[in-house]
Amino acid sequence: MNPKTTLTALAAAALAAATGFAALPALAHQHGHHAAATPNIVETAVSTGVHTTLVAAVKAAGLVDTLSSPGPFTVFAPTDTAFAKLPAGTVATLVKPENKGLLTTILTYHAVVGKVTSADLVALIKKSGGAAKLTTVAGQTLTARLSGDKIVITDAKGGTTAVTTADVATSNGVIHVTDGVFLPA
C-alpha cells in the first residue's frame, strides 16, 4: 500500500471507528460480503448512525475506500459530542471541498498503522516511563499517558482527550472511541 493510500485509509478508519461498535456482528451479516462476523472500520462507523459527524468527514475526505482496505489500523475515533466541542462552524468549514487537504490531515492524525490494543498501549506507556509517543498516519505525534485507569492522549496543540471506549474490534484493526478531536500542529 502506498503512503497516500495508507493515510487515506487511516483517516477513514478513525471516522468509521467512532460510529457504532454495538452493531458490529449484525452488520457483517446484513451486508453479506464478509465471511467474518466483524465488519471493517467503515462498516462499523456507518452501521450505527451515532457518529454522523465522523462519517460525514470521512466521506468528504474521500477516505471510505481506503478505510475499507485490509489494514490493520488503529483509529482514535471522536464522537459527535467530541466534534461539537470544536468552535462553532469548524466542522462545516472542514467538510467543504476546498478544505479536503486539511480535513484529510486532521482525520489521518487520528490513525496509526497497525493494530494497537489498549493493553499494548498501556504496556508501551509503562515501558516509555509514563509517556508513549505514537506516530500517526499524518506523520505527526500523539502522546499517550495513563490518568488513573484511563488512557489520555495529548495532541500537538497540547489538548488532552480520553479514550472512553477501548478495543472496538473490526476486521481491519481496532477503534478507540475518544471524547475529543486531535488537532495537528
Image: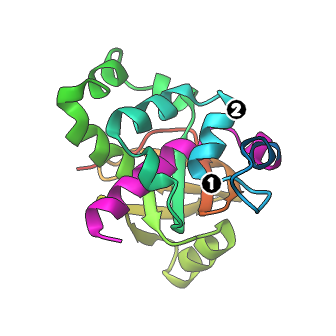
Residue 123 occupies quadrant: bottom right
Observer-nearest residue: 103 or 46? 46
**Residue at figure coordinates x 30%, y 44% from the top left:** 104
Percent position (x, y) of residue 144? 49, 63
Q: Quadrant of the N terminus?
A: bottom left
- Residue that numbered label 1 is attached to: 40
Contact between marks 2 and 1 (CB within 8 A): the answer is: no
Observer-nearest residue: 103 or 162? 103
Kindly tell me whether residue 55 is visible in this rendering: yes
Percent position (x, y) of residue 178? 57, 44
Q: Residue furthest front?
A: 33
Mark 2 → mark 1, Cα distance in angstroms: 13 Å
Name the image colouring.
rainbow
Mark toward the viewer: 2 or 1: 1
**Could you tell me the amino acid type at mark 2?**
Thr
- Please report the bounds of the magenta region as a residue range: 1-25
Q: Residue furthest bottom?
A: 127
Residue 149 occupies quadrant: bottom right
Which secondary structure is most common in the magenta stretch?
A: helix
**Could you tell me the amino acid type at mark 1?**
Asn
Q: Is residue 65 left or right of residue 103?
A: right
Secondary element at tag 1:
loop
Q: Is residue 83 left or right of residue 150?
A: left
Q: Earlier in the sequence, mark 2 or mark 1?
A: 1
Percent position (x, y) of residue 69? 50, 60
- Residue that numbered label 2 is attached to: 48
**Residue 11 position (above or below residue 22):** below
Percent position (x, y) of residue 40? 62, 54
